[in-house]
């Protein structure tokens, strides 16, 4: 299943748990813009570049009243280690059952080194204060993720 959500669609409701086991829901962000980014795996080169770029751009995003939330199929322990190692300043959801990934179309077939595999489709969703998708970034520039986001915020 490829990403089919687009600008103007209602963001799928979600419930999950962050790296500390705290419940997180889409409704927690009502009244604030939310950047929801999906990435394959903690502490891998592309995912680390993406997360660290967002960490470094956090002040600019926060100044625009934007919340940031990462989602991957890794568990809470992996997220805690990733956050600690790279001093990340935003929560990561442990979507081990892939319910959130699936709801957003961020889980599906992709071509990796010439092979078709099933996995996380790296993508970013900008969700407005009312829960409506404002923009979908399907080709994330991991080394310039913040600049890419700022074009649409």
Image: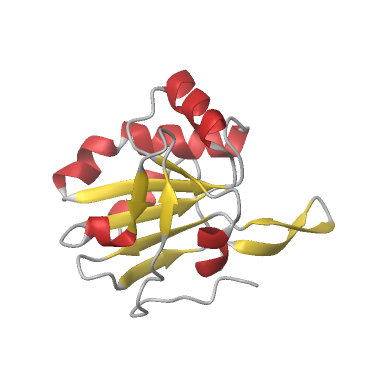
Q: How many marks?
A: 0
Name the residue: 44% across, 35% down. Answer: 19
Rendered image quadrant of residue 17: top left
Residue drawn 61% across the image and 46% down it: 40
Which residue occupies the foreground of this view, 68 or 143? Answer: 68
Residue 92 spot, x, y in % from top left: 43, 41
* Residue 153 appears in the figure: no
> Where, quadrant-wise, is the C terminus in this rendering?
bottom left
Give coordinates of residue 97: x percent, y percent: 61, 54
* Quadrant position of residue 99: bottom right
Q: Residue at x 34, y 56 (%)?
A: 25
Residue at the far right: name it.
115
Horizontal and vertical percent for residue 142?
50, 43
Q: In this orientation, does residue 66 appear?
A: yes
Q: Is residue 68 left or right of residue 81?
A: left
Front position in the image: 45 or 65: 65
Residue extending farthest bottom: 8
């Amino acid at each position: 299943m490829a990403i089919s959500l687009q600008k103007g669609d209602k963001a799928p409701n979600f419930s999950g748990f962050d790296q500390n086991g705290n419940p997180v829901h889409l409704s927690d962000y009502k009244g604030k813009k939310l950047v929801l980014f999906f990435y394959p795996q903690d502490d891998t080169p592309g995912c680390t570049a993406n997360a660290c770029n967002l960490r470094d751009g956090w002040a600019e995003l926060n100044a625009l009243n934007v919340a940031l939330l990462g989602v991957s199929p890794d568990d809470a322990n992996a997220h805690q280690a990733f956050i600690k190692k790279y001093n990340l300043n935003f929560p990561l959801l442990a979507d081990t059952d892939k319910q959130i990934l699936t709801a957003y179309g961020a889980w599906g077939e992709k071509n990796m080194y010439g092979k078709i595999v099933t996995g996380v489709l790296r993508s970013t969703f900008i969700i407005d204060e009312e829960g409506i998708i404002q923009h979908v970034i399907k080709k994330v520039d991991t080394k310039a993720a913040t600049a890419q986001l700022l074009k649409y915020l």
